[in-house]
């Protein structure tokens, strides 16, 4: 998941091209992340120290970790952290960028520092991203603190990211909720949840992303918006909302939901209690809308 | 009674779910499969064709699955009702079981779950 965030950052900064990013994202699936790259990502070593260890490895038959320990660049705990992280394999993007010679160690270190700074992320937040902990990622990027339902919104959005992974087999990425004016959504699936509290939910997307969502959920390729496409996206939202209802029910909060409604050219009214979160997939972007009031303009 | 003689109603407002279930049931050899997009339509089909089982969604327009089940029990106590729903809350589960639902599947469902229920239905019909 970190690859999606850092990769997108590099793309926006034009540090890599779309083709290069696609190439490394594909390549990263097959590679093993080296300790030197991990050490830089974790901030345990700088690029000069990593290169020094690499040069020594050419002369003496010892592993990277052993040499780094001897030189005092890593302590035992840090080495253990790196070794266990290596198994998780979430830093393949950095490794792939090095392997494909898009970046040197120096450049990688610099870009990671820029990323933390530009996105105003702390080391802890970067670690959460690297570990792919969705609940914590939500806390890093999204702010619902103006709402009385902030915890519910946060849980709901985290669950949506998990639903995307589970039901669409896709990797989602969120960005900070932008402040935006009222707008018209090309396509909208809308569903009201009610009971101990009201929650108005929606998925808004343009035609292309709507088709992408339907295709991924139904497991078949759609090219025109027909009744089956509408039914697929509506069912995706309903299944997701159902999982949310069951989770709440397990916490003794009983909620119910109305059938979904589909709109074309829907006017979305943005008010203080309405949160519009753009969710990016590799092949599209949709808005997840949650509110405790009806966000549809007449 | 073999699978060919089983009559089953699929009641779900989602065209996608009906299509997916229809494919599974057809592949499993069920010849008579009736489709309804809400509870009211399902009740009419049940009165007319007297099927042995129904896959019944809960959140639907016109008439929801829980009301449909209650209404159905007023005139048919034999039909096996399999709730197939995204809304598997404790309240719905409890009500469905009280009204004599045969099984309860929370969406997203897996093909294996449907096939396993079909096997059970076939076995019981044969007995």
Image (cartoon, coloured by chain):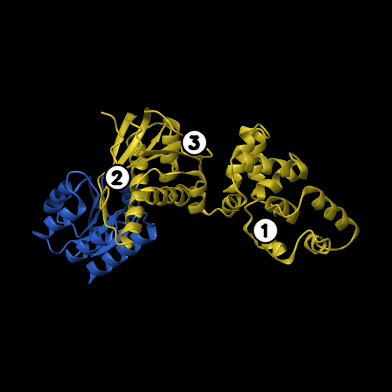
Chain colours: A yellow, B blue
Q: Are marks 3 and 1 on the same chain?
A: yes
Give the image location of residue A94, x and y in percent: 69, 46
Judging by the rendered image, the residue that carries numbered circle 2 is B14
Specify the label residue A186 is tagged with: none
Task: Please say if A164 is above or below A285.
Answer: below
Q: Nearer the viewer, residue A18 or B24?
A: A18
Measure the C-alpha gap from mark 3 to mark 1.
Answer: 30 Å
Specify the label residue A284 is tagged with: 3
* In this picture, residue A213 sits left or right of residue A55: left
Q: Label 3: few (<14), some or many (≥20) within 10 Å?
A: some
Q: Nearer the viewer, residue B106 or A157?
A: A157
Give the image location of residue A276, x and y in percent: 41, 37
- Residue A209, quarter of picture: top left
Labels 1 & 2 near each other (Cβ < 8 A):
no
Give the image location of residue B14, x and y in percent: 29, 45
Judging by the rendered image, the residue that carries numbered circle 1 is A86
């Amino acid at each position: 998941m970190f690859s999606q965030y850092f990769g997108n950052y590099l793309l926006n900064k034009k540090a890599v091209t779309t083709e290069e990013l696609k190439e490394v994202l594909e390549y990263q699936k097959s590679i093993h992340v080296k300790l030197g790259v991990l050490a830089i990502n974790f901030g345990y070593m700088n690029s000069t120290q990593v290169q020094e260890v690499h040069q020594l490895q050419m002369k003496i038959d010892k592993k990277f970790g052993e040499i780094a320990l001897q030189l005092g660049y890593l302590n035992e705990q840090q080495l253990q952290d790196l070794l266990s992280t290596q198994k998780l394999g979430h830093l393949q993007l950095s490794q792939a960028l090095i392997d494909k010679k898009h970046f040197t160690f120096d450049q990688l270190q610099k870009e990671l520092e820029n990323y933390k700074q530009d996105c105003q992320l702390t080391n802890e937040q970067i670690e959460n991203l690297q570990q792919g902990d969705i609940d914590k990622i939500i806390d890093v990027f999204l702010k619902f603190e103006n709402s009385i339902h902030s915890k519910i919104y946060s849980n709901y959005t985290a669950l949506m990211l998990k639903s995307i992974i589970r039901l669409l087999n896709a990797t989602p990425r969120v960005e900070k909720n932008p402040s935006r004016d009222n707008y018209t959504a090309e396509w909208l699936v809308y569903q009201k949840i009610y009971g101990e509290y009201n929650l108005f939910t929606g998925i808004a997307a343009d035609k292309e992303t709507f088709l992408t969502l339907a295709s991924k959920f139904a497991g078949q390729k759609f090219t025109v918006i027909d009744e089956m496409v509408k039914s697929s996206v509506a069912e995706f939202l309903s299944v997701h909302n159902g999982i949310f209802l069951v989770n709440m029910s397990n916490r003794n909060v009983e909620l119910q939901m109305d059938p979904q409604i589909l709109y074309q050219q829907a006017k979305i009214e943005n008010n203080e209690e309405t949160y519009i979160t753009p969710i990016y997939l590799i092949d599209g972007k949709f808005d997840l809308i949650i509110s405790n009031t009806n966000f549809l303009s007449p | 009674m073999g699978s060919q003689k089983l009559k089953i109603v699929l009641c779900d407002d989602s065209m996608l779910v009906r299509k997916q279930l229809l494919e599974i049931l057809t592949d499993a050899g069920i010849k008579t499969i009736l489709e309804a997009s809400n509870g009211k339509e399902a009740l009419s089909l049940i009165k007319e064709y007297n099927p042995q089982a129904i896959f019944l969604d809960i959140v639907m327009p016109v008439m929801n699955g829980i009301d449909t089940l209650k209404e159905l029990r007023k005139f048919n106590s034999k039909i096996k009702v399999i709730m197939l729903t995204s809304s598997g809350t404790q309240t719905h589960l409890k009500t469905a079981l009280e009204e004599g639902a045969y099984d309860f599947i929370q969406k997203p469902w897996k093909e294996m779950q449907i096939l396993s229920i079909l096997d059970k239905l076939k076995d019981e019909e044969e007995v």
